[in-house]
Image (spheres, grey):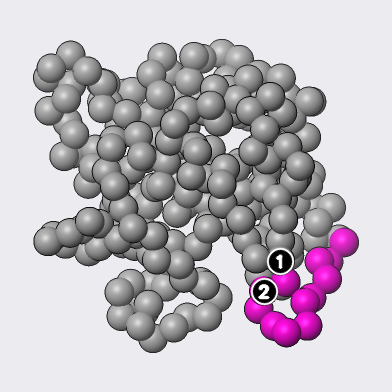
Amino acid sequence: MHTLTQFRLCPKSRSIRLALAEVGAEVALADERPWEWRPEFLALNPAGELPVLALDGGPLLCGAYAISEYFSEILADREKDGRRAPLFHGSPAERAEQRRLVDWFHGKLDREVTRELLIERVYGHLMTDIPRAPDPGALRAIRANIRHHLAYVNHLAHERRWLAGDEMSFADLAAAGHLATIDYLGENPWDSYPSAKSWYARLKSRPSFRALLSDRMPGISPAPAYADLDF
């Protein structure tokens, strides 16, 4: 069986868990605390970034980009059978749009929201024996950025069936990985963004989402509606 080294609230790890579940690839999960910079983990990925996928009898894949692209190429023959591989698919222009949005969520959204939110509300709680309280100023900035990004998701979801077009792609899973982490912490103001909420509800109801909805971090309980499909 493949082994995915991940952190349960790492959005990039979560996007890959969703992708692997969508394509039917079973994995064993190995938890890693990314702030510890353990030598054993750095030996797997010198960049110190999650996730890392050790393929059973195959190569080691480091990072969400490498993993998603690897499986997209493996599954490309599905399109020849008239079925759309649920990662990157379609024409070159369609795939370019999917990759643009993946870069938006795993790059811009991560920098402006998810990474900072994890530092303030999760890492600070877990890194020491005496939890560090979140910085109120940092949280205000993060929450303003959440609204900016949810407004963009709302626009995309209103104009398109899925975020990158007519078919679900890894762009949806990348966005969902981040928004699921933010949702665990109860920071998504869904009611102000109805199209984004409807899109997320469709994803949240898919079988691939069940494992994420059962995730629990010791000492950090999820928001009450986190696992509620009728949130």
Residue drawn at (60%, 25%) of the image: 201
Assign a secondary structure to mark 2: helix
Image position, residue 50 (x, y; %):
42, 63
Tag 1 secondary structure: loop
> Against 199, is 70 above or below?
below
Q: How many residues crowd mark 2 within 10 Å: few (<14), some (14–19), many (20+)?
A: some
Residue for point 36% across, 39% down: 21
Tell me if residue 131 is in the magenta stretch.
yes
The x and y percentages for residue 57 are 12, 61
- Residue annotated with mark 2: 126
Q: Neighbour class for label 1 at 10 Å: few (<14), some, many (≥20)? A: few
In this view, the residue farthest toward the right is 136
On screen, residue 187 versus residue 28, left or right, reads: right
**Spot occupied by residue 218 in the image (x, y as percentages of width and height):** 65, 65
The quarter of the picture where residue 146 lies is top right
Q: Is residue 69 visible?
A: no
* Residue named by callout 1: 219
* The one of 42 and 7 positioned closer to us in this rendering: 7
Tell me if 181 is positioned left or right of 208 in this view: right
Q: Position of residue 191 (x, y in %)?
A: 78, 25
Magenta-span inclusion, residue 71: no
Cβ–Cβ under 8 Å for marks 2 and 1:
yes
Per the rendered image, the range of residues in magenta is 125-136
Magenta highlight: main SS: loop
Which image quarter is the C terminus in? top right
- The residue located at (41%, 47%) in the rendering is 17
What is the three-letter code of the residue carrying label 1? Gly
